[in-house]
Amino acid sequence: MIDIFANHAASLESPATHLHAVAPSDDTDLVLVTRAIAVGAEGFVRVTTCSGSVGRVFVVPGAPFPIRATRIWATGTTATDIVALA
């Protein structure tokens, strides 16, 4: 397989290159800081951002929500099938 972009530096505007299924947790941070999150079923997602802010965002399927998150909390999260894009 040829990747003509392999030698280009990735930026926040670049497509995600890592996808991770998320098990929301009140105790554990994500392995990677996200570029966005996607969900299979709409709802609120409580996050801690890379700046340390904590809040809830409403996310719908089919439209990744651009956010740099370090944790997705179980408490306050109602969306399901969450995927972290990094």
Image: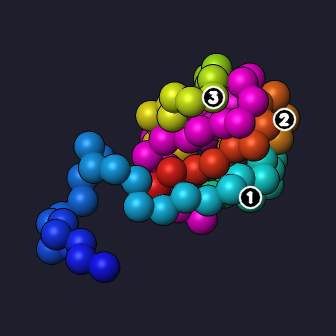
**What label does residue 61 carry, if any?**
3
Quarter of the picture holding the N terminus: bottom left
* Residue 8 screen position, x and y as percent: 15, 66
**Residue 46 shows in the view:** no
**What label does residue 75 carry, if any?**
2
* Residue 26 screen position, x and y as percent: 80, 47
Which range is magenta?
31-56
**What label does residue 83 carry, if any?**
none
Mark 2: secondary structure: loop
Disc 2/disc 3 C-alpha distance (Å) = 20 Å
Q: Tag 1: Cα neighbours inside 10 Å, few (<14), some, or many (≥20)? A: few
Q: How many marks?
A: 3
Give the answer, above or below, for where 69 lies relative to 75: below
**Residue at x-position 63% and y-position 28%:** 61
Mark 3: secondary structure: loop
Of badges 2 and 3, nearer the viewer stands: 3
Please report contact status of discs 3 and 1: CB closer than 8 Å, yes or no.
no
Left or right: 22, with 62 as reference point: right
Nearer-N-terminus badge (3/1): 1
**Residue at x-position 24% and y-position 59%:** 10
Q: How is the image coloured?
A: rainbow
Give the answer, above or below, for where 47 lies relative to 28: above
Mark 1: secondary structure: loop
Task: Place residue 31 in its image quadrant.
Answer: bottom right
